Amino acid sequence: MKPVLLGLLAAAVLAGPAAAQAPGQASAWTPVTCDRACLIGDLHAYMAALVAKDPSRAPFAPHVRFTENNVEMPLGEGLWGSIGSASKDALELADPLTGQAAWFGLVYEHGEPAYYAMRLKVEDRRITEVETVVDRQTGLPAPFGDVSKYAHDPAFNEVLPVEQRRSRQRLMAVADSYFDTVELNDGTVFAPFDPDCGRTENGISTTSGGGAAAIAQGCEAQFRLGIYRINKRIRERRYPLIDDERGVVLATGFFDHDNAFDSYQLNDGRTMKTALKWPNSITLMEAFKIRDGKIYRIEAIFTYAPYFMHNPFHVPVPGAPNAVQPLGSVR
Amino acid sequence: MAIRSFLAAALVALAAAPAASAAAAPCDSACLEHLTDAYLDAMVAKAPARLPWAKVVGYSENGVHMMVGDALWATITAHGAPVLRASDPAAGEAAWLGMVEEHGQPAFLALRLKAVDGRISQVETIVRRKGGPAPFGDPQAWTADEAFARPAPASRKALLAAMDRLAPACVRVDNGVRAPACAPSGKVRARRTPLADAARGVVLATGFFDHPARDLSGPTRYPESLGWIGLYKVRDGRVVRIEDVMTDLPYLMPAPFGG
């Protein structure tokens, strides 16, 4: 009886601290074990291992969660089997507080280029999560820029003067307000935009030049006009990486185009036709540069996904307002 | 008190009796095939509430679970006559393959429907729209191979056993385009055969062809999977014709209903 009692006591002591943590947290103290240089080193190690098709060359944890275009698969599958090379030039982001890092660039599969965004998570100096979006040329009408002209805005790497920085919470709120603006885009602008805000998507500027920019130039002007009305939902939004020194947020999510209508009117009376007539989603990784609380630069890499596909890293919230509005509900 | 309880119980039983007997009525082939027609009509009318749904319903389009009323329900503007049908009262399964239009643009649809006691509990669909590397014929000109019209009754067991035996002259048609061979391209994954139509000699199969693109032997230079629903015509213990609807999906996409 005595040993049983002691065992129960020991179990209670062991269980005590775990049950006492803040909700969702494994520990009340999480030391930074991998700083920015360390995280960027892990990005480089990952890319080198990927190009070598040899996972043993990167510091992986024994169990790694790996996704490519929202499908969870073993390391070594997907792009690991088809890659030939990767670009030297890349947009590299890091958040030592959460152990997250991201890489935006180009990969080549049997000589064909693809836009590639990758996020990894590092815990105890080991990579535990890898999430990737690969945009290939499949014949569908997603933007696909001239890879020889693909460049990243140096603003993403600039450390902001203290007076232009904002808290992590505010940076996340600003990024979220961007998606609120895109969702059901009817001219309502929830996001604070810098007057010089610019955006590139899969290597193409979509706020200056041709394409959507031919209809209206600049981030805010496009949303005031209601160009992006086809976005029924911006779903499964996540903000895994925030760099408050540089004012950078990395977001992931889906733009759902249910295409219940195939034409719509802009706020200046012009009529737009949808590019595709059928339901589709785009899955994205999007980097925001936020200066003085305003969105200054956006770089996105996205690709088509089956409509309403889910991201294995997303944790569903029952009854969340972004869940689903079924047929016949208010648009 | 005891008598009152007895009477109350009897009243409940009487009230429940008609519903229970209606629910227990078997749904034969005609009933199952009527459900697929009613389903297509309800989609075009955008009126899902008019269908007899089970308490818990699973619905998928191109491998993704979602709510009834979303996706094709929002875009469909018309449907054609079925190019192929099949049903399996023993399993409560029915299939409808044919053409649908979304804002006037034609697409191929393969639909598998499961009903329990006449109520729809599962709907699994593959919709192949124009665009992307998978084959794409003319949905409006799509007709089934005449082999499907010839009756070839066989037991469910015999039909399912024949699935891996391809006749030498077997022909496969993907989205209205004749495939180079009946044998699958790429690795077959998560194949399921939930329906065997003993009267027609037809089996419905769902699954994926995976193309890892480690070399250039596959259809694309990048990894991708093709998700499909197909009907297999069996004669004399061998598969003689396959008609399927398949679409491009992310590599190693999970199967919506297992497998």
Image (tube, coloured by chain):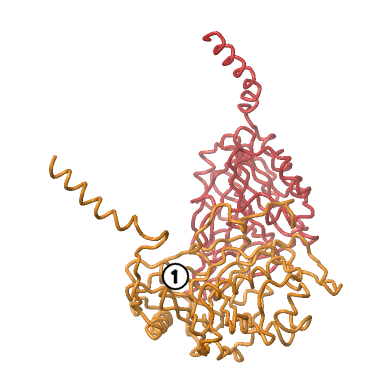
Secondary element type, mark 1: loop
Q: Is residue A12 left or right of residue A1?
A: right
| Residue A319 visible to the viewer | yes
User: As shown in the figure, which amino acid type bears the numbered disc 1?
Assistant: Glu
Local crowd at mark 1 within 10 Å, few (<14), some, or many (≥20)?
some
Figure quadrant of the C terminus of chain A: bottom right
Q: Quadrant of residue B34?
A: top right
Q: Residue at x 76, y 45 (%)?
A: B41
Q: Is residue A95 above or below residue B32?
A: below
Direction left: furthest residue: A2
Give coordinates of residue A228: x percent, y percent. Answer: 73, 71
Residue lying farthest to the top in this orientation:
B3
- On the question of residue B153 being in view, the answer is no
* Residue that appears at 54% across and 60% down: B184
Q: Which residue is mark 1?
A: A77
Q: Nearer the viewer, residue A39 or B200?
A: A39
Above or below, A72 relative to B84? below
Q: Position of residue A253 (x, y in %)?
A: 57, 68
Which residue: 72% across, 59% down? Answer: B107
Q: Chain of mark 1?
A: A
Q: Nearer the viewer, residue A52 or A34?
A: A34
Task: Give the camera-side residue of A152 and B238.
Answer: A152
Q: Is residue B112 left or right of residue A78?
A: right
Q: In the figure, is residue B51 to the left or right of A243?
A: right
Estimate the x, y position of residue A308 in percent, counting from the top left. 61, 60
Residue that appears at 57% across and 16% down: B9
**Rendering colour (chain A):** orange
Q: Quadrant of the N terminus of chain A?
A: top left
Chain letter, colour red: B
- Circle count: 1
**Residue A56 image position (x, y, % from top left):** 33, 76
The answer to whether residue A54 is above or below residue B102 is below
